[in-house]
């Protein structure tokens, strides 16, 4: 292994506009190759981002001895297949959220990773922003008392029918795109898994076949009677917040999933008192995630989030999807 992790990018999704510069900015990594389904497209992306090697297929990149780890931003439904192929090729994998489309696929990936000794991380980048470390610090210090309610929202407008979010066969829809953030954040701040869920969705015809959820609202009940409310959509005005309420106070975080290296304010509210505003110095969460992953690859340090966490997130998403479908069919 080299002193730096040599990254290959498996695909040219729009998110790479943020993630390639971030991986290039890491202290312990370098981006040395990018692959697309066409060599022309791969060369365009390589030239645009200053990447030395371009590959005309994903398999070509995985066969390269110059690549240690891949960043995988492919459509959701392709994650399982290409994570397994990457592991078979001896590459570590940082995969865009969600890791896979269900818990069984996540567990399949975990078995393969364990068998190969390779690292795999689900790329929920927001967890690496310093403000979430501050949030966890406040919660552990009892800032809200007994946790009672969590309200989290994440929505935006995905645009026209050619967007992959409108393709059922690619794992599109609001729940598995923006909703997975809401579920992940809820599980993180409660530190538990839900005991029951309920959900209601708005649907439309997919751009390929079947139906796709455009927006969804859900309720999750956790041990100790904490209740999480979330709403999310990919055809709505942009909304992005996290509010945590307990018996002793309330914490509020604006734009929890959207910042890069911007500074942030975390509000702490208590009965009848002036709010306390915790100013948190920002650092690009994609950079921090990349450095954390590369450190694990290079030095064997444990990953902060394991694949059991990814499987539990997928399990909750599936339960919410099934609940929403039940009401849509009623």
Image (spheres, helix red, strand yellow):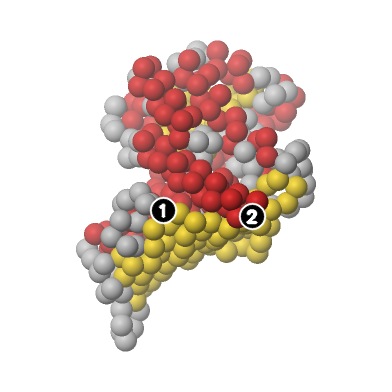
Residue 4 seen by the camera: no
Q: Nearer the viewer, residue 210 or 271?
A: 210
Residue at horizontal 38%, vertical 67%? Answer: 149
- Name, please, the residue furthest toward the front: 330
Q: Which residue is mark 2?
A: 330
Relative to 163, is 280 on the left or the right?
left
Relative to 33, is 219 on the left or the right?
left
Quadrant assignment for the N terminus: top left
Between the residue at mark 1 and the residue at mark 2, the CA separation in whole angstroms equals 20 Å
Secondary structure found at label 1: strand
Q: Nearer the viewer, residue 184 or 1?
A: 184
Crowding at dot 1, Cα within 10 Å, few <14 / some 14-19 / many 20+, comes out as: some
Relative to 12, is 250 on the left or the right?
left
Q: Is residue 313 above or below residue 278?
A: above
Instruction: Single out the mark in the foreground, 1 or 2.
Output: 2
Q: Which residue is mark 1?
A: 196
């Amino acid at each position: 292994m080299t002193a730096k992790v040599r990254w290959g990018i498996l695909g040219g999704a729009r998110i790479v506009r943020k993630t390639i510069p971030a991986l290039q900015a890491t202290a312990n990594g370098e981006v040395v190759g990018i692959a697309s389904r066409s060599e022309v497209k791969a060369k365009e992306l390589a030239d645009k981002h200053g990447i030395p090697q371009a590959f005309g297929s994903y398999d070509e990149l995985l066969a390269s001895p110059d690549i240690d780890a891949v960043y995988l931003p492919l459509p959701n439904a392709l994650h399982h297949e290409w994570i397994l192929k990457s592991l078979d090729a001896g590459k570590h994998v940082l995969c865009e959220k969600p890791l896979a489309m269900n818990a069984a696929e996540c567990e399949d990936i975990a078995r393969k990773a364990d068998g190969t000794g390779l690292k795999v991380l689900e790329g929920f980048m927001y967890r690496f922003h310093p403000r979430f470390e501050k949030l966890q610090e406040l919660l552990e210090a009892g800032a809200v008392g007994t946790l009672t309610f969590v309200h989290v929202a994440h929505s935006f407008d995905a645009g026209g029918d050619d967007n992959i979010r409108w393709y059922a066969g690619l794992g599109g829809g609001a729940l598995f795109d923006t909703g997975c953030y809401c579920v992940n954040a809820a599980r993180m701040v409660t530190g538990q898994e839900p005991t029951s869920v309920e959900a209601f969705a708005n649907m439309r015809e997919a751009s390929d076949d079947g139906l796709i959820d455009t927006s969804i609202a859900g309720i999750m009940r956790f041990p100790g009677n904490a209740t999480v409310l979330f709403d999310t959509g990919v055809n709505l005005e942009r909304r992005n917040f996290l509010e945590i309420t307990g018996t002793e106070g309330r914490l509020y975080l604006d734009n929890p999933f959207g910042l890069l290296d911007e500074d942030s304010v975390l509000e702490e509210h208590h009965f009848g008192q002036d709010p306390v505003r915790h100013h948190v110095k920002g650092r690009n969460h994609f950079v921090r995630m990349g450095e954390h992953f590369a450190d694990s690859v290079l030095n064997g340090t444990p990953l902060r989030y394991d694949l059991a966490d990814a499987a539990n997130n997928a399990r909750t998403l599936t339960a919410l999807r099934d609940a929403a479908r039940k009401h849509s069919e009623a």
